[in-house]
Every structure is written in C-alpha cells, then in structure tokens.
Amino acid sequence: MKIFIILPFKESLNPRYSGAVSIFCKDIYNYSKYKKNIKIISSADFSKKKLFRNQNYINDFCKKYKNDKIDIIELHNRPEYVNKIKQHFPKSKIILTFHNDPINLRGSKKLSERKNLFINCHKLIFVSNWIKKRFFLDVNDNYFNYEIIYHGVNKEKNINLNKKYKYILFVGKLNKSKGYDIFVEAAKLFIRKNSDWKFIA
C-alpha cells in the first residue's frame, strides 16, 4: 500500500517552515503502523514559483507522480486540491482533514463545493465538533463518510495537582482567525477581578 500525505503549500517538515498541520502529520507518521508506506509531500519538493503558488504546487505534484499507483492521498486544510487530485488519480482514496473553519477555505465556502467534497472524498475528517458543524451548515442530505478525530498530546505521568500555576496559555498564530483578539479581551476582563492569574501567548 502507498500513502501520500500532502501538506499545505506554506508548510514543510523543516522546523523553520513547519506549522500546526505539519507537526500533526509528523506525529501521526511517527506513531503509524503504516510508517513504511507513507510519503509526506511539501512544497520543498517542488520549484517555488511566485504566482499561483497553491495551483502550481498541486499541478507539479500531479505531473511528478502521475504514473504512481497511490492507494491513499491525504490532504490537510486544502479542499481546493480535491478536484485536481481526483482528476489525475481517480482510483486513489482521498482523505481530507479540516483543521480550520471550512467556510473560510477555498474549495469549501459554497454549499455546492462542500457537497462535491462528500462525493469526491473517501473520508472527511474534522479535528473538532465545531469545525464539523461549520461544514454541515445548510447541508440537509445524509452523508456518513466523515469522522471527528481530536488532536491529542502525551499526558505527563504523576502530575502534582497541588503545584498548579495560575497561568492561562494561548497557543497558535496571534491573529483573529485563531481567536487571539478574543483571548486578549477575555484576559483584560479576567485580570481586573483575579490579578494573581497570568495570561501567556
């Protein structure tokens, strides 16, 4: 079996250019029993053209691997790649994982585009119930080829709950799409009443 994981254009396994998706994929790869069958693709594998970068990236992938028999092609956060992948690899199973609000991503903003994804993907995966609900906005048909798979971490053993710190941590890009503005406003209100707490971003 041959499995290809295609990272978003801006991400790679290089720590300098990694992001949430590439870190997630690397962790999945490290724990997978199919490790020997997996190839992770990033834009580092192709020439970086200045214009139409996402489009060129997926076109270059299709040209490079057009003669390969790929059983599963896993995409992350890029519904816009699905039609091109389906066209060039009609026998491959496409799995698309959403890490962000589908309504804000090219290729899943419209209801017709989301319905098309159900038809062209073997499985849709959402990393939260909220993201799943956003995808199903105005979708009345019954679809069953989806799953919710939450992100996880390795839990430390022997945590001493008596030594907790009063810290609230924000992890992610410091922008509105990640909710950083809400975090800042909440921190301001909270600190007025509980000044012994600290907020870290």
Image (cartoon, rainbow, N blue to C red):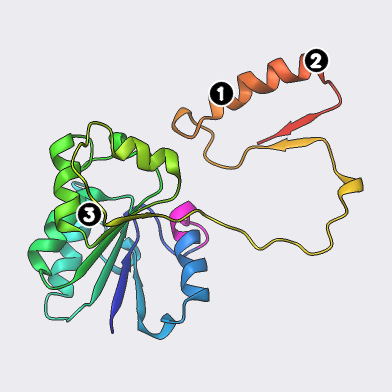
Classify the position of the N terminus by image quarter.
Answer: bottom left
Q: Which mark is on residue 49?
A: 3
Q: Where, by quadrant of the figure, is residue 89 drawn?
A: bottom left
How many residues crowd around disc 3 within 10 Å: few (fewer than 14), some, or many (20 or more)?
Answer: few
Q: Amino acid at mark 3?
A: Lys
Residue occupying image coordinates x 15% and y 67%: 62
How many residues crowd around disc 2 within 10 Å: few (fewer than 14), some, or many (20 or more)?
Answer: few
Residue projecting furthest to the right:
162
* Vertical side of 91 occupied by 198: above or below: above
Q: Nearer the viewer, mark 3 or mark 1?
A: 1
Q: Is residue 55 visible?
A: no
Q: Mark 3: which secondary structure? A: loop
Magenta stretch encompasses residue 24? no
Q: Amino acid at mark 2?
A: Lys
* Vertical side of 90 occupied by 147: above or below: above
Q: Is residue 11 left or right of residue 64?
A: right
Residue occupying image coordinates x 44% and y 43%: 129
Q: Which mark is on residue 80?
A: none
Classify the position of the C terminus by image quarter.
Answer: top right
Q: Amino acid at mark 1?
A: Ile
Q: Position of residue 152 (x, y in %)?
A: 57, 57
Mark 2 sits on what residue? 193
Q: Is residue 181 visible?
A: yes
Extent of the magenta region? 15-22
Query: Could you tell me how many numbered marks the image carries?
Result: 3
Mark positioned earlier in the residue sequence (2 or 3): 3
Magenta stretch encompasses residue 18? yes
Q: Mark 2: which secondary structure? A: helix
Q: Which mark is on residue 182?
A: 1
Mark positioned earlier in the residue sequence (2 or 1): 1
Q: Is residue 143 left or right of residue 126?
A: left
User: Which secondary structure is most common in the magenta stretch?
Assistant: loop
